[in-house]
Image (cartoon, coloured by chain):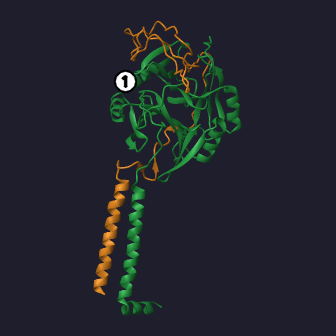
Chain colours: A orange, B green
Amino acid sequence: MNKLLLRCLGMLVFVVLTLTVLLSGCFWPGGGYYDGEDFGPGYYEPSGVVYGGWGPGYHVAPFRGGEHQRPTSGGGHASTRAYRSAPASHAMPSIPSKSRSGGGRGGSHGGGGGHR
Amino acid sequence: MIPEITENIRMQPDRVRHFFRQRLLAVLLVVACAVPVMAAPIQLPTIVNPASQEHHVGKLIFVELVTPDLTVAKQFYAGLFGWTFRDIQAGRTEYAEALLEGRPVAGLIHKNLPAGEHRQPAWLSFFAVGNVDTAKKVALQNGAKVLFEPHSIPDRGREAVFADPQGAVFAVLTSSSGDPPDILAAPGEWVWSSLITRDPDTSAAFYQMLFDYEVFELPAREGHQHLLLASDNHARASVNTLPTNRLNAHPHWLNYIRVEDTIKMTAKVVALGGRVLVEPRIDRHGGKVAVVADPLGAPFGLLEWPDTESKEVPK
């Protein structure tokens, strides 16, 4: 009877150890894509966000069609801007114009400059 | 009853041993089968199918929505844009791949809203980078915060989520299937992005450092800035001044879906249970723009971009 008890105890220890080793692989920090029970990105935006206040002249879209006049404040020369303005020789581009089936329609970007 | 069992055990030690062996074997078998399933890495679909060899650093290449009600979200976007969905069980998380005519357009993730945290559903913008870990280094050096550390997902690629120095949240992704080609988005696909922020000037500098954008300045009304971020000779996004006359306004990225008729689509948004946040209005390109929210509150833009070649520009 003692032998049987020892064997059972041995098996139990083996099972517990196996489970511990294997499961630790699933939840080891940085070892997988799990963060507990969920995965992937979470909720980052604060609630109660309000929109509006886009008064007249508040534009978000790019120009459509070919080249457009650049304002004089930009143009790649030294300015008080935190960013580097695109060189004055580069035309302002628009969104891609090529359609899925080939050929340009709709958007078209400014030609004649902007090569990188 | 108990003395009877004890007596049986005493009388039949072999049978008891056999019984325990069988049980233990069964437990081991279950563990052996279950653990590989639990430990298997999350697998998400590729963002480009078939895979391409294209790479466009700074291009918006994917968007993901975290939502508390996947069923409602799917019904709304299916009704609005004709998206279809492929459900994927990723671990214990429900994930739906949104498709337009078989092409991947977005990913939707179901997550319960965390209790006590004042958060809302939103579309997360993924911009292409050559190396996520290098992007993390550059972002941190320039004042960003890491919200989700770089991690690799089989088939998808390597990604990370950051908050820029002014708090706008965005993600970077090195797609293992390449980036989508630079072609005009079809109606129902993502066509444009705007960063609406307190200081467009320093924001543009931050993203220029990260994605090597060319920055163009567009005419804007007094007290506002409208900057254009470009790469590969294509406009990628705008940076706009956050209107100051709104409480609770905070810097954020807003993505726009191409539509053929903004007015019709905003009416459809309302009919499907969504809300109009910014009424349709003519924008710089001559088409109408609107901002709407899905029934769960996730905002996105609608941008009318006709197929014709006219250069109608509003004053």
- Please give the name of the residue rendered at 50% of the width and 13% of the height, measured from the top-left corner: A110
Residue B251 position in % (x across, y down): 50, 29
Residue extending farthest to the top is A72
Taking the image as shown, residue B136 lies to the left or right of residue B87, namely: left
**Which residue is painted at 58% across and 34% down in the image?**
B299
Amino acid identity at mark 1: Met
Between residue B252 and residue B87, name the one nearer to us. Answer: B87
Task: Say if B101 sits above or below A116 in the image.
Answer: below
Q: Position of residue B98 (x, y in %)?
A: 56, 40
Residue with the mark numbered 1: B209
Q: Position of residue A40 (x, y in %)?
A: 45, 44
Image quadrant containing the C terminus of chain B:
top right
Nearest the camera: B202 or B33? B33
**How many other residues sit within 10 Å of disc 1, few (<14), some (14-19) or many (≥20)?**
some
Image spot of residue B167 (x, y percent): 45, 31
Residue at position x 39%, y 55% from top? B39
Q: Is residue A51 visible?
A: no
Task: Determine whether B210 is above or below B107 in the image.
Answer: above
* Circle 1: element type: helix
In the rendered image, the vertical position of residue B61 relative to residue B238, given as above or below: below
- Residue B288 appears in the figure: yes
Residue drawn 44% across and 28% down?
B166
Residue B285 versus residue B310: which sits nearer the camera? B310
Q: Which quadrant would residue B120 be assigned to in this image?
A: top right
How many labels, in total? 1
Q: Chain letter of disc 1?
A: B
Looking at the rendering, which quadrant does residue A12 occupy?
bottom left
